[in-house]
Image (spheres, coloured by chain):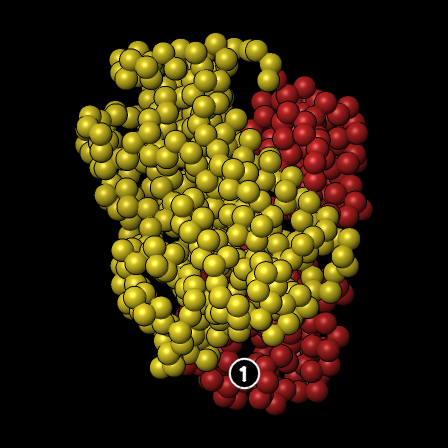
Chain colours: A red, B yellow
Amino acid sequence: MRWSNIVLSAAAVAITASSTYATEDLGDAEAGKVVFAKCKGCHQVGEGAENKIGPHLNGVFGRKAAGLDGFNYSKSLVRAGNSGLEWHADTLSAYIENPRAFASGTRMSFRGLKDPKDRANVIAYLRGFSDNPQDIPEADPTARGTDHSVDPAILAIQGDPEYGAYLSSECTTCHQIEGGDEGIPSIVYWPDEDFVVAMHAYKDKQRPHPVMQMIAGRLSNDEIAALAAYFNNPE
Amino acid sequence: MTLNRRVFLGAAGVVAAGLSAPMVLAQGKPRVVVVGGGAGGATAARYIAKDSKGEIDVTLIEPSRTYYTCFFSNLYLGGFQDLSDIAHSYGTLAANYGINVVHDWATGVDRDAKTVALAGGGSVPYDKLILSPGIDFVDGAVEGWDVSAQNKMPHAYKAGSQTELLKAQIMAMPEGGTFAMVAPPNPFRCPPGPYERISMVAHVLRENNPTAKIIVADPKPKFSKMSLFQEGWANHYEGMVDWIGEDFGGGIVSVNPDAMTVTIDGEETKVDVCNVIPAMKAGRIAEMAGVTDGNWAPVNAADMSSKADPDIYVLGDASQQGDMPKSGFSANSQAKVCANAVRGALTGSKVFPAKFSNTCWSLIDTDDGVKVGATYEATPEKIAKVDGFISQTGEDADLRKATYEESVGWYAGITSDMFG
């Protein structure tokens, strides 16, 4: 966990503004291919890639640090791997920004990529050589989600039931609009406030349930209010 | 079911269908035609009809009167569901939502005239066309197998009579016999599906034929929920399942349906049942409409519109959208985004931003359920995964039981979301 805290600020810098889409791709893979020229002296990636001066980078996303059998890693990276460091977009970005700051004693003698865009692009390029979520749904994400911060004045928000009706279609894949509750609870005709409190408890991961944490985690305050308004009286 | 406006509209729909001239009555209204009545098509048709409150004329073309969901068909193989539990009809969509349900094959699309041709003759005009045809198989994908061999070596990857046949063959296996599966290459419908099926077959054999064996020839080095399935197979079905992956020649495979043999990396084995799941492509109508590129139909992530034609949308397994697995849940999720966009385009209703999600539950043994899920968002390039979770190995029995019960609840939820 602490690894992800360290790198959050670095990841936030890498996000650039977009006009029509809130979600960002990890970066531009084509541009990343060009950036990767700086890495190629030591690292191979793609069909037939092998360990050279550095380990090959196929399947690096989701892999434990120092996780390839048959490569002689530095003690520092082995220790990081044993402490739970895994390679994901955020940890990779922090590592290649300044390898020695991230893992003192690493043998990666590279002064680092200072430009967040370069990092995002090379990470997007490398992402193409790891598992595809279409085939292995549990594989690493390929984009950064929209960040929804929690507003203290949450309960005061008036929900838009029309927006709620649209958003509700995601809920009714599992929760029946007629209110059936076998295996999956009923969510209709709740008082608005109870609904809002429950959804925020999932969003903040206080209530346990991975599906609900995931669904609530990306709903904004307005969206939760809209859902509460709709499910309060779904006609 | 309460009596409301939808019921009244539905009555009009049935009359129109009875005259077999639904387009005449619908003149002046925008027309949406949906091809394929599964998780994508049925959901899209229902949402457009429901939310447009009669402003849009919706026609659903689906050859089957009784639709068997592919999801949960493995549970039928395992004896956890009856075939009737996974059977659905379109009566409610016609009666309560006013959808013109046409039981026929769509045999072509004229994109200039904007009409869909039907096998039974005639054609249906559209303003917006939604294709949700599911999958077909790539010819010659498994040496020795083609669709004409499907009664000897069933694929059972479109649910219904094939699933029933496979189940009958499993039940008729001789004592200590061998069940073989030829697993498909990526990408394919339902990534955990073949492996849940192995679990369900192992469950049935352990109860009825405990000395029987299962071999799986797989062209892939790994698969979804692999550690969960392998843990489950070791715990529940010790020594029964032999999974041969790419590294051991699992992709070098041929079959002989007459001799009932499977040859894996040069080694021939006589088997009693052989479930061949070939490589897949978009359902045929997508290709006939000219919206495919290679095996699948590329779409825009924001609304599922075809990259080849802005008036055609492709949902579910047939679409090439990015990171979402080909699953019923995904198709249902995409259908709602598409329905919202289509309604907006035709009636000017508010179009909200796309949000997608998926969860795949799998059953390993009685009360031992696992799941994997993710949320996705539209980027300019594709539908991209942004967050997710997966069940963990070593979870306690209560959690696994709750996960299974949740999957049963989900089945009730999604089928009522599809069929009303």
Choose between A229 and A89: the one closer to the eye.
Answer: A229
Q: Residue at x 79, y 29 (%)?
A: A194
Q: Residue B340's x, y, as percent?
A: 47, 29
Regarding residue A130, the answer to whether it shows in the image is: no
Q: Is B404 located above or below residue A85 in the figure?
A: above
Front residue (pair B375, B367): B367
In the figure, residue B226 lies in which quadrant?
bottom right
Classify the position of the N terminus of chain A by image quarter: bottom right
Task: Using residue B183 as the reference point, say whether residue A22 is left or right of it.
Answer: right
Secondary element under disc 1, as helix, strand or loop, is: loop
Residue at the spot of label 1: A55
Whether B389 is drawn above or below A129: the answer is above
Q: Nearer the viewer, residue A231 or B155?
A: B155
Q: Note whether residue B412 is visible.
A: yes
Which residue type does callout 1 highlight?
Pro
Q: Quadrant of the C terminus of chain A?
A: top right
Q: Residue at x 53, y 52 (%)?
A: B77
User: Camera-side residue: A4 or B246?
Assistant: B246
Residue at horizontal 58 percent and vertical 50 percent from the top: B79
Percent across and percent down for residue B96 are 49, 18
The image shows residue B22, relative to residue A31, as above or below, that is above
Q: Quadrant of residue A222?
A: top right
Which residue sits at x=29%, y=55%?
Answer: B147
Q: Is residue A8 left or right of residue B358?
A: right
> Tag 1, which chain?
A
